[in-house]
Image (tube, grey):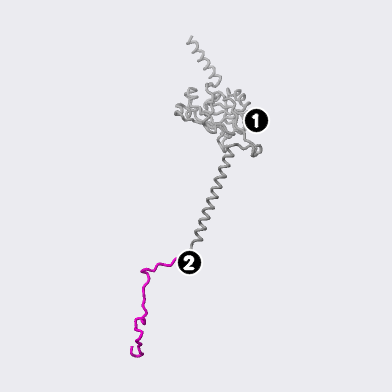
Amino acid sequence: MDSLIQQLVLLCAVYGAAHGVPETVLYTPEIVPTRIAGRITQTTVALEQPRCVFDLTEPLCVSCEVWLVVANSTGVATFNSIKNEFFNTSIYTYKNAFTGPNGFYVTVKTRRDFYRCPTATPGQILTLRVGSEVPCQTPNCNAPLISGGTFRMKYILVNLDLSGSNIVGETKFTDNIKLLDATNPNTIDTSAGRRSGGMVVITTILIILLFLLLATFAVMLALVCCKKYEQSDFPTPLATGGSLRRYHTHNLHNKSDIIMQKGKM
């Protein structure tokens, strides 16, 4: 019985490979844990990298590449209808993804070896941020997503050496991921009655700090003015000890009762 089951599994694998059916890996891309800031924004989504996901798919393929598929509600059905054919990645770009019938695009091309095991160390989260490439300079760039849009994403493994059906592996699509909407500033109520208690406390603290700052400035200004008023307008006399010589006038040494006559000096 066991041998029969093994033969059926092998037969299905051979049949699938012959008809170009991608191997579906039992893995669904996940958004990074909630403790990571900015996991979902208006234009980006932070996914966990597909580490170890395709290690057993086409293990001898040295040129296999991992791509990310980003699709809207109609793009999921479109991708499923063409994935068994030759998949030209240069056609499904961000530029014409949502303006035509495609509804999806592929991006973030990565060599399969980059995502091989071992996984990250405990506590480390390896992130792939979808929509982070600004400006968009290549056809398959990782451009910002449409603000407020809803998308589903999956990883695929593409074998570049195949001329026929070259998607050899795929994960499951994520559930719908809704991006954040930008709030219209005209709709924000700024009336005093709508202010929260925290805003009132912060405003009060700022007013008190401003009052203390002004009071400190006034006191310092008063001290400076008073000190200037107390100073004399006359300069302080220079110290003369040991710096000036004493001179005596000659006639002060003569006796007052002796008058020298002319010609007898």
| Part of the protein shown in magenta | 236-265
Could you tell me the amino acid type at mark 1?
Gly
The foreground one among 262 and 72 is 262
Q: Which mark is residue 234?
A: 2
Q: Which of pointers 1 and 2 indicates the residue nearer the eye? A: 2
Task: Give the class, few, some or many, for how many residues have Cα within 10 Å of label 1's Cα (few <14, many ≥20).
Answer: few
Circle 2 packing at 10 Å, graded few (<14), some (14-19), many (20+), is few
Q: Is residue 184 left or right of residue 9?
A: right
Note whether residue 201 is visible: yes
Q: Which residue is mark 1?
A: 100
* 51 shown above or below 205: above
Q: Identify the residue at the far front of this view.
A: 257
Residue found at the very far right of the displayed protein: 186
Most foreground residue, 200 or 105 = 200
| In front of the other: 2 or 186 | 186
Image quarter of residue 163:
top right
Decide whether residue 242 is among the magenta residues.
Answer: yes
